[in-house]
Image: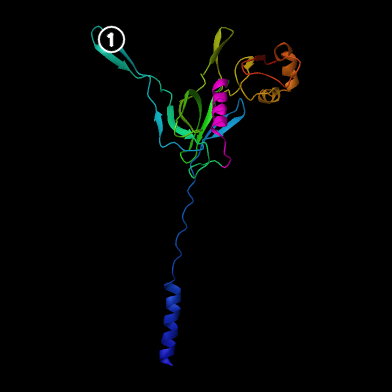
Amino acid sequence: MIINHYSYLMKRYMSRYLKIKEAPKKKEVTERQIWLTANASKVRVQLPVLPESISFQKSNKNNTFMLAESGEVATIGGEGLTKISFSSFFPATRFQGVKTKKFLSPKELVEKIERMQHDKAPIKLTITGLNISMYVMIDSFKKTEKGGDVGTIYYSLSLKEYKKAKIRKMEMKKKKAVVVKKTDRVDTKATGKTYTVVKGDCLYLIGKRYGMNWKKIYNANRNVVGANPNIIYPGQKLIIPS
């Protein structure tokens, strides 16, 4: 009886204090993605193949001066804009390294980026996993094709951080200067009152881009478009009515 009671106590002890702990769950790793978004033309591009490296360069706008007695002196200037550059490729066919759910052809991706560049408006760069979300301008977009890889387009993209200039307006009231601060808001609308047609455009898409009915644009450009509003050609300059 004593042995049985001792065995019972040992079993309770083992079950209470020597429980096997569950292995901790692995944290889900967010897959890195790179997006370019143009609010002006409502175009959004996810890069299908991530670049091997991304270069970020930032420098201050320092100045140097020559003084007759002191020689060369330096002054610390304002903070410079960040420059981002990387290279990758748009594959002709899907493979394991493609990160996008929807596969777009190299030609379609090139046309979308060139449209962003043509709009002359800031675009938004988003890199998940690095917490990067900033407005940029396209400095250069270079693309090449190689003989051994037909259809694939290799590219280099250079971007520069966009910051809208802060404007201070002076209002004179009863001989007292009042400084009115403007809000530092990024304007993502395409500039200018004219639009140059690019390949793949139609009046409906152009009207959607500028938030108006395509018929309004057609009526303002009958002499350019002609009798058929369904046919427009790259290079035509259209007036965007206010």
Instruction: From the viewer's perspective, tell me whether residue 236 is left or right of residue 77.
Output: right
**Residue sitting farthest toward the bottom:** 1
Residue in front for this viewpoint, 182 or 209? 209
Q: Position of residue 129 (x, y in %)?
A: 47, 41
In the depicted structure, whether residue 50 falls above or below residue 194: below
Say which residue appears at 40% left-offset and 30% top-offset. Answer: 56
Q: Is residue 240 magenta?
A: no
Q: Which residues are magenta?
A: 101-118
Prevailing secondary structure of the magenta residues:
helix
Task: Point out the image quarter for the C terminus.
Answer: top right
Q: Quadrant of residue 184?
A: top right
Q: Residue at x 71, y 13 (%)?
A: 221
Residue at (53% x, 16% y) in the render: 167
Label 1 Cα neighbours within 10 Å, binned few <14 / some 14-19 / many ≥20 = few
Residue 237 vs residue 43, the one in the foreground:
237
The image shows residue 89 at horizontal and vertical percentages of: 47, 34
Q: Assess whether residue 103 is covered by the magenta stretch.
A: yes
